[in-house]
Amino acid sequence: MAPNPAAARRTRLAAAGILFAGALWGLYWIPIRRLEALSLGGVWGSLIVALTTCCLLIPWALAGRERLRRCHPLGILAVLLGGAAFMCYSVGLVQGQVAVVILLFYLTPVWSSLIERLWWRWPLTGRRLAVIALGLAGLTLVLGAAGSPLPRTLGDWLGLVSGLLWAIASSGMRARSTLGPGEGSFVFALGALLGALALTPLLGPWPGLPPMPALGQAVAWIAVSAILWWAISLAIVVWAASVLPPARLGILMMSEVLVGVLSAALFAGEPLSALQLGGALLVIAAAVLEVAPLPGRRLSGTAR
């Protein structure tokens, strides 16, 4: 059967969109660190970005209110939890080493495998056991480079928690969510805002607005973050997930790890040690093994 040209173009566009969105999130530490330098560090810069995103997406939430009404409550809860996971990730980028936080987030396949076993009672296959072993070995090397395989900083803990929450949220979204990109992004941003509010007791009181010369810069960074990262890129991810098979989607999203690790080493002065690089390769191997097609199957742009 001849391939459908329109479907092929749609697949190529979705793949390019996911590569772009992943690479963009690999650079998300830049606006968050800039807000920290402008006296909006801790959770406060991320909280204002999430609040701004919610306000921007209200028209789309109203347009999709019928889908919101019909969506299963557990589906909405899962999307809210996904937003909270990304907020933990966002704050972790301020509190910890960028590359380490990104790698801890990408331990999601380990938590997904354990959740499927402990919660859904699904058997662990050999592949799943390998994913867990590679992921935990990578975690040990990434964190153990400084002498202990346990998280040491608040940023480490937030990176770890963000991956765990995302594993739970993504499982619930696949099972229950029927939201479209517009209203789905609004609920996601609302979950991020609620997550930020929950973190405020841990990260200090409101620091006040930046002084006037810096206020304009802060507003610009907040607007760019809300529009480019939280509104546009998340809408791309939601749409592309309906076009691409999960295997291809997961592999293309790994552009975030590459861009994040390289950009942090080049521009933030945070290179990984040789031991941490070894751990990073193991974490990436676990993620690729999680989404790689089974023998006898192939990655398809249209398979669903």
Image (spheres, helix red, strand yellow):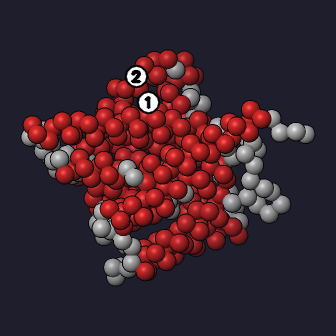
Residue type, numbered disc 1: Phe
| Residue 236 percent location from the top left of the image | 53, 37
The residue sitting at 55% across, 66% down in the picture is 284
How far is disc 1 from disc 2 in space, using C-alphas? 7 Å
**Residue that mark 1 sits on:** 186
User: For the point 49% across and 27% down, which residue is it?
Assistant: 183
| Residue 273 appears left or right of 17 | left
Numbered badge on residue 58: 2
Which of pointers 1 and 2 lies earlier in the amino acid sequence? 2
248 and 146: which one is in front?
Answer: 248
Give the image location of residue 67, x and y in percent: 56, 22
Label 2 secondary element: helix
Q: Nearer the viewer, residue 272 or 4?
A: 4
Say whether marks 1 and 2 touch (CB < 8 Å).
yes
Q: 178 or 6, which is in the foreground?
A: 6
Amino acid type, label 2: Ile
Which residue is the extreme one toward the left? 211
Is 28 displayed left or right of 42 in the figure? right
Compared to residue 276, the image places residue 78 above or below, namely above
Label 1, secondary structure: give it. helix
